[in-house]
Image (cartoon, rainbow, N blue to C red):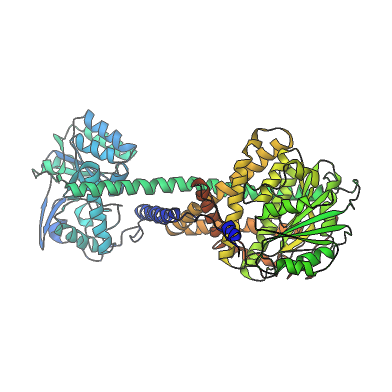
Amino acid sequence: MSRHVRARHKRSREPRGHWLLLSLVLPVMFASLLFEGWTNNEVDAAPTRHDCTEPVPKTVSRGGPVLRIDGDEVKSASMPARTVALTFDGGPDPVWTPRLLTLLRRHHVHATFFLFGVQAARHPELVRRIRAEGHEIGSNTYTGADLGASSAVRSRMELSLTQTALAGSAGIRTTLLRMPQTTSPDTLCGAEWKAAQRAATDGYLLVAADPWHRKPSQGVIRQFSQTELAYKETEKLLNNRNIDKFTTVTAGLRLDPPDTSATTVERGQGKGLILVTAMGHAFANAMTWMLVVAGALGVVRLLVLVFFARAHVRRLTRLRPGAPWLREINDPVTILIPAYNEEAGIESTVHSLLASTHPYLQIIVIDDGSTDQTADLATWINDPRVTVIRQPNSGKAAALNTGLAHAMYDIVVMVDADTVFEPDAIHELIQPLAHPAVGAVSGNTKVGNRRGLLGRWQHLEYVFGFNLDRRMFEVLECMPTVPGAIGAFRRDALMGVGGVSEDTLAEDTDLTMALWRAGWRVVYQESAVAWTEVPTSLRQLWRQRYRWCYGTIQAMWKHRGAVFEVGPAGRFGRRGLSYLGVFQVALPLMAPIVDLFALYGALFLNPVQSTGVWLAFLVVQLASAGYALRLDGERRRALWSMPFQLFVYRQLMYLVVIQSLVAIVLGTRLKWHRMQRSGTAADHIGQPSQAAELTSR
């Protein structure tokens, strides 16, 4: 390879740092979601308490609601007569905790708040307010899990995380603990009692409550939640004239305050926990909305595609340029075939064109500095209609411009060197040019080498994605791309926009957009069929789609001014560019988050509901794809591979979009990724089809 060729194909390295960033950000996001799911759904805790298998010790059942356990020794205490300790479990609740605090302040009363650690982490300002207004704080564990049914590890986490949350929100540690799902001391039985003993070894003072039938005049600890009902019951109790004193648990029993100052390290850990909790909560909420938006956009896109595809079929013989009332085009055609190292398929491509039913052809093969026998093989075909031009490697756009300079006829067809054509493809392709407003025509590209799973996936994408899109684009008059594999152009239209631009890597998209802005219309001829060779490995597919996506975004940015123009250019800009921006760029960027949240939903939300939503969307996709296959005369048995496409192929496609956007933002110049050809584009030609005449559909 010459020095010039090597220089042409060498580009700056692709960006790598963003993959490191993504590999760090996604695990952090998922870890935050896991933590959010665990705290919201109590993964390994029982939803309800198990029945007691052993009675509570008599010293506990006959004693007061405040317990200090030291090994086998249990000491209990009760409130003095006519003294009530108000206690509130759960929370802090953003609605009712402030109202309760206001009520207590109005009556000049202090109470004890047993808080969930997760709520303390979510609402640290309320924890600080509780402490600032003189109330005492105890632990109600982190999530309110049943400690008796939880593992030892879970129990330790429930207690330690609550302390961490309190340290981060109010800078304190507490020695008060109320076991979740317990009321009076006799509910501390069986496994719950063993959990209480474990907690006592960590220095906790256990606080239950007196039975509701015990009169306040006897001295009680009252247990409330943080709800509207609790507010009303508290207000009623505060107006009870038989009570002399309302107090906290420790003040009523003349004990030392339960809270101590947390260390600097503990406060730092607590602030970190608050941050992680906030991130997880924000991610979950944001992802819920993003999932709704992405799902709605996906369904709307499918419905719109089917609607406009049907409209396209109905107008085939009535309103579309190229309908029978226009004259038949039999004018001579120049076919341009740019080729770089295409020895595997160049002969098949040229021979399929020579077999065309359209008799008047000039076939120009532009060898763009190939290092193999591409030019020789094309020359050896030895047909007067075939001309081979050799030039130093300059890129595909330059090769097309070279061919355009040698074109003899007013109709120019541009094709890829890895594509083979049906005999009537060229004749069918040029028919819409009978309408004077049409400047370019897109053909129907199909996958030839579709035998493997990757080939079937691309076959479905070509039929369901690309070709169904093109039907819609034609109806809406906003076709963004005439594919390089098969497209027809007016020579004067091409010359009017300066030929094929080298500004982007998607020269076909760039050229199509330029034609719209020049006032030409671009249509789709579904009956002009060409068979192309697609990548046979994920690495090759990545390189191809990376170049496509990168070049398409370049072209979109280059022609962004079309949005503000009038006529055909304005219609294309406002419809075509908007569609590409939403469904080809924005929606794929949301896809990783959707996948992440789908996994979150399967783990922590309703798995049946999550699976049902996924299956419903899959059914809609399958139905739409089946309709697209029928329109294209393809067998629908390929649909069996579509569900598997959602697990590998889809992820590859949205990673391509991410890579392309990052490369463009960082100003990286993408190198041209050439696919290794095997000459299998014609593999599918000649196989039976279920196609019916379009006019009969």
With respect to residue 353, does 497 lie above or below?
above
Residue name at image x 89 percent, y 49 percent: 324
Horizontal side of residue 133 vs 405, given as left or right = left
Horizontal side of residue 438 vs 191, given as left or right = right
- Viewer-proximal residue among 549 and 229: 549
The image quadrant of residue 71 is: bottom left
Q: Let me know if residue 210 appears in the view.
A: no
- Viewer-proximal residue among 504 and 455: 504
Q: In the rendered view of the protein, which quadrant contains the N terminus?
A: bottom right
For the image, the number of numbered tags is 0
With respect to residue 249, does 633 lie above or below?
below
Residue name at image x 83 percent, y 68 percent: 382
Query: Measured from the top left, where is residue 356 in percent x and y?
Result: 85, 62
Q: Let me know if residue 502 appears in the view.
A: yes
Q: In the rendered view of the protein, which quadrant contains the C terminus?
A: bottom right
In the rendered image, the residue lying farthest to the front is: 3
Horizontal side of residue 33 vs 480, given as left or right = left
The image quadrant of residue 603 is: bottom left
- Viewer-proximal residue among 692 and 450: 450
Query: Measured from the top left, where is residue 674 in percent x and y?
Result: 61, 62
- Viewer-proximal residue among 421 and 270: 421
Residue name at image x 17 percent, y 60 percent: 197
Query: Measured from the top left, where is residue 232 in percent x and y?
Result: 30, 35
Query: Measured from the top left, where is residue 490 in percent x and y?
Result: 80, 46
Horizontal side of residue 394 vs 656, given as left or right = right
